Amino acid sequence: MSRLVSLFVCIFAGILLVDSQFNVEIQEPKLTSFLNRITNTTFDLIRSGINVFGNTIETIITTFSKIEDRLSALVELIRSQLIKGVPELSIPILDPLHVNKIEFDVRHEAALLKGNAKNITIKHISKFVVTKEKLTDLGKLRFRLDINLTFPFIRANGTYQVNGLIGQTFRIFGNGPFKLNIIDLRIATSTILKFTLPGQLQVENISILPRLRKLENNFENMMNDPDTGALINKAISRLAPEALKIFWPELKRPIELEFIKYINNLLDNASVVNIAKRIFNIT
Ligand SMILES: *[C@@H]1O[C@H](CO)[C@@H](O)[C@H](O)[C@H]1NC(C)=O
Ligand SMILES: *[C@@H]1O[C@H](CO)[C@@H](O)[C@H](O)[C@H]1NC(C)=O
Ligand SMILES: *[C@@H]1O[C@H](CO)[C@@H](O)[C@H](O)[C@H]1NC(C)=O
Ligand SMILES: *[C@@H]1O[C@H](CO)[C@@H](O)[C@H](O)[C@H]1NC(C)=O
Ligand SMILES: *[C@@H]1O[C@H](CO)[C@@H](O)[C@H](O)[C@H]1NC(C)=O
Ligand SMILES: *[C@@H]1O[C@H](CO)[C@@H](O)[C@H](O)[C@H]1NC(C)=O
């Protein structure tokens, strides 16, 4: 049994590393509703924040003359609100973040995986570090904003359920609690912002590139067998950074387009644009 598993682990690793033609279908409506949850909450936070923290933002604008310094100060303001929430606006605490359910349905010749994760608690998302931040004036009121973030250590736990086939023969299944330690997740973003007169600001494009250094995971009750389960967990841990690289090109565009749509929805508001203009020194 365990030799078969080692063989599968090697084959699966090989397929993941070699086959760049990954055809992953994460069910679109489900992915979108998950993103909606995250982006809506975040943008509600920003939108309401402009009302509640108007004075703080005012202070930031007058205290710092460099645009980069203003953005750094805004990032710190957002970080503190992730931790504290804004009870008077029913904005929940986002660190720890609670997600009720994520469903997935991956269909590919190398793997079929269907299942979900429920009752997920994600901790330490507010402990990100802004590793690099750069604003480039592209002329004609267009700007490129490059922000790189590092999340040194995110913990998540919850319950999971998965059922699937690897390489058309190896059945994989499990159901129970899980724990993840996501170590050194780096997200590089590059956003093109365009001010159009009068008084409009739109995101023209956004590029998001995540990289993961290490994943520690324990999915309990995998394969109804502790030894096999331990091997599968090891395989997941070993493959995760590479799998993210391979899957990302497929996932990237729908996720980026969602972000563009939601940010533009947020920017479709005169008071938000006015604040942004003042932050960017545009008259
Ligand atoms: C998020 O907001 C959009 C537009 O404001 C809305 O259509 C959508 O239903 C919201 N999603 C959730 C999960 O609340
Ligand atoms: C979800 O997890 C919390 C603790 O994290 C627990 O109190 C609660 O009972 C769980 N809910 C369900 C439906 O499993
Ligand atoms: C997640 O971990 C917390 C402790 O950090 C615990 O209270 C909770 O029950 C765990 N949730 C699940 C679903 O195991
Ligand atoms: C952000 O990270 C990416 C990928 O590591 C890198 O190519 C880019 O130059 C970085 N951006 C800045 C502003 O340093
Ligand atoms: C937007 O950015 C993506 C990279 O994420 C790039 O592939 C695409 O060509 C860009 N689109 C435009 C119109 O610049
Ligand atoms: C724009 O945002 C302001 C500040 O949050 C809010 O008071 C106003 O209702 C919004 N306007 C529209 C049209 O959404």
Image (cartoon, grey):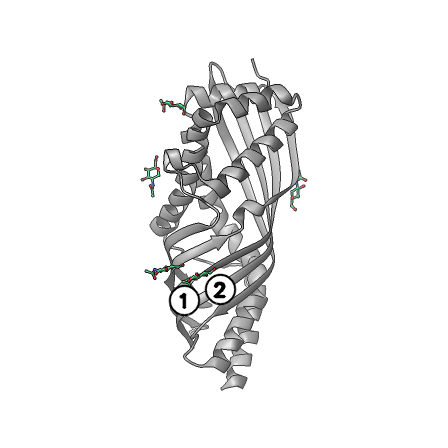
Q: Quadrant of ligand 6?
A: top left
Q: Would residue 192 appear left or right of 261 to someone viewing this image?
A: right
Is the shortest distance between ligand 3 and the CB of mark 1 under 8 Å? Answer: no
Numbered tag placed on residue 112 in the rendering: 1
Judged from the image, the secondary structure of the residue bearing numbered disc 1 is strand
Figure quadrant of residue 223: bottom left
Q: Amino acid at mark 2?
A: Lys
Q: Which residue is nearer to you in this view: 280 or 243?
A: 280
Label 2 secondary element? strand
- Which residue has dot 2 on it? 179
Q: Is 51 drawn above or below residue 77 in the view shown?
A: above
Query: Of the residues shown, which amino acid type is indicated by label 1?
Result: Leu
Going 51% across and 74% down the picture, which residue do you hit? 232
Cβ of mark 2 under 8 A from ligand 3: yes
Residue 11 visible to an observer of this rendering? yes
Contact between labelled residues 1 and 2, with CB atoms less than 8 Å apart: no
Q: Nearer the viewer, residue 201 or 13?
A: 201
- Seen in the picture, residue 104 relative to 161 is either above or below; the reply is above
Q: How far from the left and from the top, in percent, is residue 136? A: 65, 28
Q: CA distance from mark 2 to mark 1?
A: 22 Å
Q: Give coordinates of residue 110: x percent, y percent.
A: 47, 68
- Upstream in the sequence, badge 2 or badge 1? 1
Tag nearer the camera, 2 or 1:
2
Query: Residue visible at 49% across and 15% down?
Result: 197
Point out residue 247 in the picture as x, y percentages from the top left corner. Answer: 51, 56
Residue 201 place in picture, x, y as percent: 48, 23
